Image: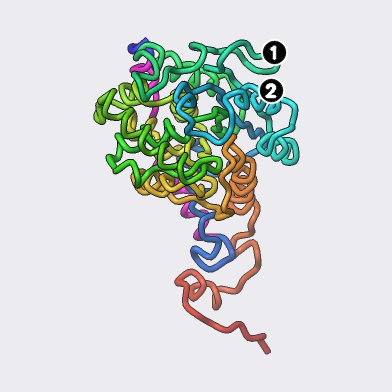
Amino acid sequence: MEEQLRRLLAAISPLDEEAMAAARRRQAELAKPPGSLGRLEDLSVQLSGITGRVRNVIEKKHLLVFAADNGVAEEGVSSAPQSVTLQQTVNLTRAKTGASVLCRHFGCGITVTDVGVKGPVPEPKVVDRKVRNSTGNIALGPAMTREEAVRAILAGAQTALDTPADVLGVGEMGIGNTTTSAAVLAVLLPAPVEAVTGRGGGLTEAAFEKKKAVIAQALAVNRPDPADPVDVLAKVGGLDLCAMCGAFLGAAASRRPAVIDGFISAVAALCAWRLCPTVRGYLIPSHASFEIGYRLAMEAMDLKPMLLLDMRLGEGSGCPLAFEILSAACAVLNDMATFSQAGIDDGYLEPIRRGDSFTVEEKP
């Protein structure tokens, strides 16, 4: 399995610089002041680098949600009972959750994959790629074996590779996974536990203090190797995190953009980036998560979210919104008129291209 992972990493190629240069030239020809459409222009250039085509269309949009339970929930680090993982895993397939409602609203596909839910999932629409029934309690020992972590990474990658779409979003469902994500982030940055740990789904002050203490205990008990992302995931991570990491790798290997959701998705993306730095060019953050560690993960990868909505639901809920912005970026590059097509006189052309301030006056 380690060899399969190495082959996956080797299949990820850098962005196409020639296509990006061509996209920038086209942006410079469009009838607008340079840079006036801001991030939309940047995104259109990035998409060209990902696909190797100057003109792109985002038609097939798909959210991948990976579900798994986390043994650390036994420590009382979440405001919700562990049974919610199973309930919401099923509800995601029935358009009853925030992310799935947004997918239905925008016409996005959604695939929910069980990689570690505790017990059987009584819903045939949930894809069964279960590695084990929940992880172990990281406060007492490792979350899983290294082999199980690699299996989960490869399961996520295969899910991405098997999904026909122009863009993929990566989300999760798993009670206790803000705790595992904070633990992984604390090791990889590295950073103090207090700097990366938020309240998650709304803990009391006492429960929040216990959550930080549990993470600190997990790091002391397991001693994960910060130079080895797989070791970190195996010792203090989660099966959902592993599979999400794999999904980012699979999207990059198939030259498709991968949209990051919130905090947990960002930590999984960070793991993918640490395994293969080339992955960064394929990553597109959606919204700025309310969780405290999100900003640090983004800074580590030098990425910037496109939306500020105070969202903190998870599930991949930011991805359907980001898909629409990516589609808009494509429309601008594909459909806007150039200066010549718009019939703009050369007398006005150079100041606009230079970005000079000017006043348009009617000709006599």
Label 1 to label 2: alpha-carbon separation: 8 Å
Q: Residue at x 51, y 44 (%)?
A: 204
* 352 relative to 132, above or below: below
The type of residue carrying mark 2 is: Val
Which of the 4 quarters of the picture holds residue 81? top right
Q: Is 27 a magenta residue?
A: yes
Q: Residue 270, position in %: x, y?
A: 38, 36
The residue pinned by badge 1 equals: 122
Quarter holding the N terminus is: top left
Foreground residue among 74 and 129: 74
Q: Residue 12, position in %: x, y?
A: 39, 27
Which of the 4 quarters of the picture holds residue 269? top left
The type of residue carrying mark 1 is: Pro
Q: Are marks 1 and 2 in contact (CB under 8 Å)?
A: yes
* 17 relative to 3, above or below: below
Residue 286 in the figure: left or right of residue 220: right
Foreground residue among 264 and 330: 264
Q: Can residue 90 be seen from the camera position used here?
A: yes
Which of the 4 quarters of the picture holds residue 138? top left
Secondary structure found at label 2: helix
The residue pinned by badge 2 equals: 90
Q: Please identify the residue farthest to the bottom as the structure is shown.
A: 364
> Which circle marks residue 317 in the picture?
none
Magenta segment boundaries in residue numbering: 5-29
Foreground residue among 27 and 224: 224
Q: Residue 3, position in %: x, y?
A: 33, 11
